[in-house]
Amino acid sequence: DAGVIQSPRHEVTEMGQEVTLRCKPISGHDYLFWYRQTMMRGLELLIYFNNNVPIDDSGMPEDRFSAKMPNASFSTLKIQPSEPRDSAVYFCASSGTNLRGYTFGSGTRLTVV
Amino acid sequence: SQQGEEDPQALSIQEGENATMNCSYKTSINNLQWYRQNSGRGLVHLILIRSNEREKHSGRLRVTLDTSKKSSSLLITASRAADTASYFCATDAGGYSTLTFGKGTMLLVSP
């Protein structure tokens, strides 16, 4: 298995633009997580899915953020409109049913100018 | 909010020395996990210790857990330059809860 695959690896965009981050979890994993990492706040859970259904989105900062999982092999995190304070590294992770160790992707480094 | 708190925030040692990182948490857990993050990469799962375990080994890694003190330690023996990374503890409260990560310890191992 190639692991959790995220794209793009880097994204630079202008304030106000829409940004879409993509994730392909490990095949067979039931859980998918979106995290955001910054120096100030560390690693924050934004939202997670179980069997493609959003379970807890209480970590999503505001309505500008949305996430979808249309099928078991694909998820997106969208920011519209983007703001400079959204600049961070966004990680996708997946896990099996027993919720043991998480497997993380390599992340998307987002810079909003 | 983040439950795990690592200590120290940063640690600098020489190759061959041992590195010890600590993690404290606040509420009851089902298990505690340690992850490593190399610069510019995602987190990698290292080891999991269940709440009824006190010590666990994996290669050069040794993890201890003291549930009475709500603390854990990660020991890396005979460190190498390749061990340079940030190390995070994560707590699992069990049930359908998700992992809660600390802010990590940055380890620098100099040749």
Image: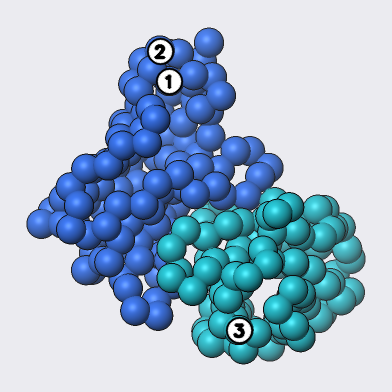
Instruction: Give the drawing colour for chain B.
Output: blue
Q: Above or below — where is B109 with respect to A99?
A: above
List the residue tagged with mark 1.
B79
Disc 1 marks a residue whose amino acid type is Ser
Callout 1–callout 3 Cβ contact below 8 Å = no
Q: Is mark 2 on a helix, strand or loop?
A: loop
Q: How far apart are marks 3 and 2 (CA)?
A: 45 Å
Callout 3–callout 2 Cβ contact below 8 Å = no
Q: Is mark 1 on a helix, strand or loop?
A: loop
Residue A63 lies, in percent from the top left, at 68, 88
Would residue A36 be visible to someone looking at this image?
Answer: no
| Badge 2 or badge 1: first in the primary sequence | 2
Q: Quadrant of residue A11?
A: bottom right
Instruction: Give the drawing colour for chain A.
Output: cyan
Q: Which mark is residue B16?
A: 2
List the residue tagged with mark 3.
A51
Residue A36 lies, in percent from the top left, at 61, 64
Letter of the chain that mark 2 sits on in the rendering:
B
Q: What element carries label 3?
A: loop
Nearer the observer, A30 or B69: A30
Callout 2–callout 1 Cβ contact below 8 Å = yes
Disc 3 marks a residue whose amino acid type is Asn
Please give the name of the residue rendered at 38% of the width and 17% of the height, measured from the top-left corner: B78
Nearer the observer, A103 or B70: A103
Q: Do labels 3 and 2 share a chain?
A: no
Q: Which colour scheme is used?
A: by chain
Q: In which quarter of the image is residue B77?
A: top left
Q: Are marks 2 and 1 on the same chain?
A: yes
Task: Tell me the quarter of the image containing the N terminus of chain A.
Answer: bottom right
Q: What crowding class fits label 3: few (fewer than 14 Cα within 10 Å), some (14-19), or many (20 or more)?
A: some
